[in-house]
Structure formats: structure tokens, C-alpha cells
Image (spheres, coloured by chain):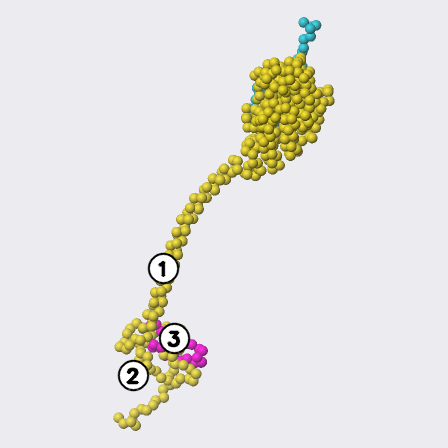
Amino acid sequence: MGISDRKKSIDVSVNINLDFNEEIRPNNFIVENNFKSGFFVSRKKSGNIIAGSKLNVEGQGIFTVKGGDNINITKHFPKPTPVSDGLKPTPTPTPTNTPTNTQTPSITPTNTPTNTQTPSITPTNTITPSVTPTNTLTPTKTPTTTPTPTTLPITNPDAYAYASRVIASGGTIDYTTATALDVLFTDLQNTYTQAGPTFYSVLEGFYPMLGLTSATQAINANGNTVYDLQLSGGWTFGSLGMQGNGINTQAYTGKDYVPITGYELDNTHFSIYGTIPNNTPSNGDLSVSGVERQVTITLNKVGSGTGRYEYDCSSGANSIALLNSGDFVTISTSGGATFYCENSGAGGGSAGTISTLSNYGSLYLGVSTYLPSTCTFNSGRSVNTFGWSSFGGFMNPTDMVNYQTIVNTFMTSIGRNTY
Amino acid sequence: MKVAILTTEQKDILDKQEVCLKLKFNPVQDVNENWVISEVEVNECVTPEFMWVKDLVLSDWMGPYIPPTISEGEI
């Protein structure tokens, strides 16, 4: 066939319809830039390319794209799995991405140790719950004693013990009273009598009468429960102390003198504080009474207008001593003379010896029950209100002043003082 | 001041028994030799077996019993 016979050129219009919704059906694998003639699907297609358009042949797809380069319409076909006779340079880069995926898992193990450490922290949390039960026990102890003592400004252990007894008996101790108790106990324990012992050791029994019930006001503050008051009758309890009714009230201290001798009486003191000024007339606010009556303090004696006291009245050897209507009275004796102290002012003594006395008697508050003919007092019950009382060893006149000053400081702190 | 009058039997039951913690009944005789307890004891009583005292009638206190004295001329 001659050259002229050959077909030199043929204009073939190619129309390619692009349907993106059509299911992808890859053609057989072709090799790029292989322009060898052959089966149609394996040859480069040609056609009219519209100006500004791009023919993109990737792998085996042929697309005509209209528009500028900013329009990226490229049909990506799945990677052909079949391998033809040609080379496959393109798949080679694919494994290059694979290491990338390989590195990703290598990071994962890095996180794994982190997670491994987290469980190691978990045991720490396991210990924490074991601490929690300890906290659970703490509140259990709290109701017993912790709350109140923690809030009370008390450093003196004996004051603390007394306050605790008041609270345990149903009473309350406020901040002011707690502070006053701390001072009171410390002063009593750090102040010495002329004979040597502290006031605290001289006091066999003393009664601050705090709280608002029989259970709290009966407490002997030095902790010796033998001398807790044994109350009977219609006592009324309030912020000023305990008030008798004049009918059947009495408070037995638990102190018995079996018998009380003259020598023992020489080593005693008694005190009582009426917290309503001038007090109501009576025939006995404190007494040692029994088969016979030995000792009586009357803050305001019926018919006399002033107070009285008697030491060893049953023997008749001890004359009646006048008081000056003081609200806080302390009496003591040296055997040859008796002494009294009213409202922190020392008084004189009355003559008379009591060293030969031997008799029985018990110490009561609010009553003098026995009336020997030698006693000038009548018997009777008091209607007075008492905010303090004590009994114990000897105090000389100087001691009694110091003692009353300490006690009245306490009474002033809690608002019970009358002078 | 008010009191509650007791029979002798009631007096024996209450004597030295607890009104409440650390407080005991203390019956005494009034001027007419009646045994009495005070209104306070009645009101404050919390002891279950003695709650019947709250049903006792209250009356005025007439004063304490005064034992008769024998004068020399009476002997």
C-alpha cells in the first residue's frame, strides 16, 4: 500500500459522558505513557480537547475536565490488583505509607506504659479508702468527749475533769464559765495557805453548783464523788445556784464526823455563798447536825437582821458570833478561838475552847435539824439560793481572805457575785 | 408554797426514792401532822413508778410540824 493510500489523518469526534453516580467499573490495567497500539482500552485515547480543559488519565481512567486548574475533578479508581506484563512503578510508593501506619502502633505502646503507670497509682487509691474508715471511727469518738472539750478554753486538767462531769450529767459549760473555771482551779492549786498546803488540797469538798439541774449542781468539783451532794426535797435549780423551799429541802454532803472531836473541829473550815444579796432570814443555811448540833452558819438569822454562826454550840462553850450580813461566809477555828470571814474581809473571833468535844454529826446545806438547848439558834430550813459551798481543813484569817478573793473572782466572772 | 398531802403508805413508798437524777423525795410532816411533799418534787418527778404523784391534790403549806414539849408542870 502506497503512501497516498494510507489514511493520513482522521478527525474523530470523541464524546465522553461523565457520570459520577455511575458505579465504578475499572478498565483493564494500562500503563501510562505506553502509546503502543493495541486494544482500544489499552491505548491512549485522543479527541478534541477544549481549550482550558484538562484530560486526566490516571491509571486507567480518562476524563475531560472543563474549566480552569482550580477545578479538580479527578476520578480515582481503585488500585488494580491484577498485574499485566508491564512494570508497576506506581504501587511502589504505596508501601511508603505503610511505615507511617507502622509508626502509629509504635506510638501506641508508648501510651501503653502510661496506662500501665496509671494502675500503679490505683493501689495508692486503694490505700486511701483504708484511711477513710479511720475517719469513720473519728466521728464515733466525737460525740463522746471531743467536741465540747475542744471548744472549751480549759488547760487545767482538774478543771477540765469537772467541766466534763457537768456536761456528762446533762449540763452545759459556756466559754465564759470555762475560762473562769480554768482560772479558779489554777488559783486554788497555786495559792498556798499559811500552814503550807494549797487551797485545793485543803478543800475536801467544794461545790460551784453549775448547770441547771440537780445532777450537775450536786457535783463535788475535786472529783471525790463520795462528797457529791445528796439532794432531797423541793430544790429549785437555776443560774444562781440551788434554792431551798423552806419546807423539806436539804443537801447532805456525805461528810460524817464519827465522832467529831475537838481536835478535828480545830482542823475544819466551812463556807457558803448566798447569791441573792442580803438573803432571806432563816435558822440555818449550813450545819453539822446529828445527835447534837455542832456548827451552824446562818447568813441572815430570823429576827436578828444579821447573820450568825456557831462552832460547837452543843457544848455551850462557844458563844454566838455575830456576822455582818455578808453573803459569802467562811468560818474556821484554832481551838482557842473561832474566825470568820465575810465578803473577803476578815473578822474577829469568839472566845471558847472546843478541844474536848466528842460528838457525832453530818454536814448539811440548807438546814439545821437538831436543836440542843445549848444552841441559841432555832432549827429550820432555808429558802436561800446557794452558789458556792465548801468544807475541809483549817484556814486562818489571812487564808480565808485569800480564799474568798479567789472564789469571788470566779463568781464575778460568771455573774454570781454579790459584792 | 404548795404541797401534796400523802397517806402514810404513800410516804413510805416515796421516802428516799428518786424524783430525778441526784434528787430524792423527802416527805415531811406539816403542822397538822400530815405527810407532804413539795410541789417542786411533784413537777420534777420523772421516775416512771412514781408518776402517780402528779395526780395528787396540791394545797397550801401550813407550816412545819412542831413536836409537843412536855413542861415540868405536866409531869
Tell me: A371 left or right of A254.
right
Main structural element of the magenta stretch: helix, strand or loop? loop
Q: Which residue is mark 1?
A: A109
Tell me: A50 left or right of A267.
left
Q: Is residue A348 highlighted in magenta?
A: no
Vertical side of A357 occupied by A74: above or below: below
Q: A195 or A109: nearer the eye?
A: A195
Question: Residue A370 lies in what quarter of the image?
Answer: top right
| Label 2 element class | loop
How far apart marks 2 and 1 lie (CA) works out to: 51 Å
Report the chain holding disc 3. A
> Which quarter of the image is occupied by the N terminus of chain A?
bottom left
Please identify which colour was used for chain A in the image: yellow
Vertical side of A339 occupied by A98: above or below: below
Please identify which colour was used for chain B in the image: cyan
- Badge number at residue A36: 2
| Label 3 element class | loop
Image location of residue A251, percent across then percent down: 61, 23
Report the chain holding disc 2. A
Q: Which residue is mark 3?
A: A75
Amino acid type at mark 3: Lys
Asked if residue B24 shows in the view, the reply is: no
Amino acid type at mark 2: Lys
Image location of residue A322, percent across then percent down: 70, 20
Residues shaded magenta = A58-79
